[in-house]
Structure formats: structure tokens, C-alpha cells
Amino acid sequence: MTEQKTERLSEPAAGPDPVDDAAVELPLGVRVAAAWSWRLIVIGVAVAALLWLIVEVRIIVIPILIAILLTALLQPLVNALRRLGLPRWVGVVAALLALFASVSLLVVLIVTQLRSGLEDVTSRSTRAWRDFLAWIETSFGVSGDQVDGFIDQIVRTIEDHQDEIWSGALAATTTAGQVLTGALLTLFSLIFFLLDGKRIWFWVLGFLPSRAHAPVDTAGRAGWSSVGQYVRVQIFVAFVDAVGIGVGAAILGVPLPVPIAILVFLGSFIPFLGAIATGALAVFIALVYNGPINALVMLGVVILVQQLESHVLQPLVMGTAVRVHPLGVVLAVSTGALLAGIPGALFAVPLAAALNAMVNALNERGWERGHDPVAAFLKGDKRQRVVRRRARHVARLERRKGSA
């Protein structure tokens, strides 16, 4: 009896065999996909958190980015005056005065030119719109009230969704207080970047592990060089666009050629979108003042200048400077405008150029092994402070001897 009971206990239980999880070997593709999936999820969460943080502090981020672009533009002037033996603060003051003079000149030209012609543009636009409504009514049998109602509906739709259209993740500041705060922050950041940019950079590097100092410094210098080249080349491209369209407008007898040229110059800093908007404005003024034939010729001038930029300046000058494919520029501008509105479109290309240069520098691994740039900078900075302290001491002794 006992033997039968023992045999029954030793018999395996009925049902399917238990499966050992360790014995299940997943295909290589599934394991690779799973490994990449959780890593991509972590990266996505980190990027989302970073974007949320930038949105929360956008009133600080946008002025600092503007100051960085202006620093890349003005730094060569400061360095040139420094090589002439002048103190750095003299170069900074000269660079700031040159910037303020240029901006003031553009503002004065726009205000003085538009003050005399804006009222006339408004009246002629109203008259041209009435003529267009009359032509629509006689040609297609559509009443002007129907067209006005359709236009009003479009305007109301745009107004209802203007936050989504214009703001994006980095909405431009709209209140006077935010504009003033951003302007002051940009100015102070620009001054300190020009005066002590190298010290600020190595201070930021100091938060990283020592083994990361050399590669990050190499990548940062490559990105900074690319941003500087982009800013200088973009000014040249914008100048060519402004001169071409402004001269074309003057030759065709289009009113307000100087404001048109200035707006084209400023709009060219937003790739593709800015050029299209300012070119459309030039064509509209030609249509209102000189009729459809003159507007078509003005449109041809705008297209010719844009083709010159796209097929000559962008590949030969901009492509060599920033080494970003035109398709990458289009995608960067579109993504930046989608995520951050106008600021995103403005900063998209320099950011893409900097990232491209930094990745290439890291791939080349051109930094010196075992070299710590932060430690070398701190050592050299300490030596310079000692030299300056001794020079001041010698100067005080000489002044005392002279007074005695």
C-alpha cells in the first residue's frame, strides 16, 4: 500500500510541461529591437523634458541664443583690435558701437521712408482691392459681399488659431516688459561673452568629468567656428538679396525701394520663409502702384535673385561654410518653425551647422590624449594674474619714485 502511494506521488502532474524562461532564445532581431526601444524611450523622455524646460525659461533662452549669434559676428573685430595691442575692453566697446550704429541706421531708414509712403500704400491697397472685387463680380458673377465674407471667415479662423500658428514651443515674447527684459539680457550676455567668453566656456567645461574635457572642448570649438562662419556668410547672402531686389525695384519704378531692401535683408536671416515673405511684399507694392505687368516683372526679379542665391551662393558659399546639405537646411527650418515658431526658424540652421561640426570633430578624434584643456587654462590664467600683479606692483613703485 505504501509503495503504490509513493509511486502515485512520483508521477508527473497532468497538463502541459512547464516552460523554462531561460530556455527560450529570442531571435537576434527581436533582442536588438528591444534593446534599442528602451534606449530610444529614455532619449525621447529626456528630449521632452529638455523642451519643456526650454519652454518654461524661453525668456532667458532666446536672448542668450541671440547674444551667441551676435558674439560670433562681433568676435573677429574684437580679436583684430586685440592683435593691434589694444585692451580687450576697447575692442568690445568698438564692436558694440558698430552694432548699435548699424541697427540705428536700419531703423532710421525704415521709419523715415515708411512714414512718407505708408499712408499712400494703404489707400492704394484699398483701391486695388475694390477694383479686384469689381473684376471678380463682372467676370465670375460672384458678389463682392460674398468675397468679403469669405475673407472675413479666413481672418477669423487665423485669429482663432493664431497661438498655434505663431507661437510654437518657443513663443516670441509679446509684452513690453518681456521685450525689455530680453533686450537687456541680450546686451549683458553679449558684453560678457565678448569680454570673458573663454573663461565662461572653461567654467562650463569644469562641470564635466576630466576625461571629457578634451573631446568636448574640441567639439565645442568646431561648433563655434561653424556658427561664426554661418553668421558672416548669412550676412553676405542677405546683403546680396537686399541689393538685388532693391535695385530691381528702383529700376522698375516701384516705390519704397529702400524699405523693401532693408526688409529683404532682415528677412533673409530666416532661410526660405523670410525671403518668400519679403519678396511677396515687393511684388504686392509693385502690383498696387504700377499694375499687374510691372508686378510680374518684379516677380521675375525676385525669382532671379532667389535662384542666384539657391544655385550659386548657397552651394558655393554657405555650403562650404556650414557643410549642411540644402535638404538638411529645409528640414531644419521646417522643424524649427513647427516646434518654436519664428525663433525656431531663425536658430535652426546655425544649430544644425554647429551639431554637424561637433559630431564630425568627435568622429575624427583629433584631440590630444591625456590633455586637459581646463587645467591648462586655469594654470595659464593663474600665471597671467601673477604677471599682471607684478606689473601693477612695479608701476606703483615707479610712481612713488617719481613723486619723491
Image (cartoon, rainbow, N blue to C red):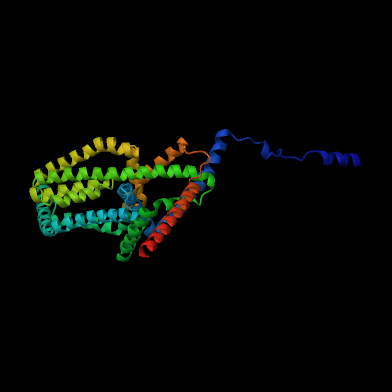
Q: Is residue 129 visible?
A: yes
Say which residue appears at 24% left-offset and 43% top-offset: 236
The furthest residue to the front: 404
Q: Position of residue 297 (x, y in %)?
A: 12, 41
52 or 210: nearer the viewer: 210
149 or 385: nearer the viewer: 385
The furthest residue to the right: 1
Say which residue appears at 10% left-offset and 57% top-offset: 120
Q: Position of residue 20 (x, y in %)?
A: 69, 39
- Residue 326: image quadrant is top left
- Residue 402: image quadrant is bottom left
In this rendering, position of residue 14 left or right of residue 348: right
| Image: 31 above or below 160 | above
Say which quadrant the C terminus sits in.
bottom left
Q: Count the numbered circles shown.
A: 0
Say which residue appears at 41% left-offset and 50% top-offset: 198
Q: Position of residue 352 (x, y in %)?
A: 37, 43
379 or 237: nearer the viewer: 379
The furthest residue to the top: 28
Say which residue appears at 16% left-offset and 52% top-offset: 259
Q: Is residue 352 visible?
A: no
Say which quadrant the N terminus sits in.
top right
In this rendering, position of residue 8 left or right of residue 263: right
| Image: 119 above or below 291 | below
Q: Position of residue 305 (x, y in %)?
A: 19, 40
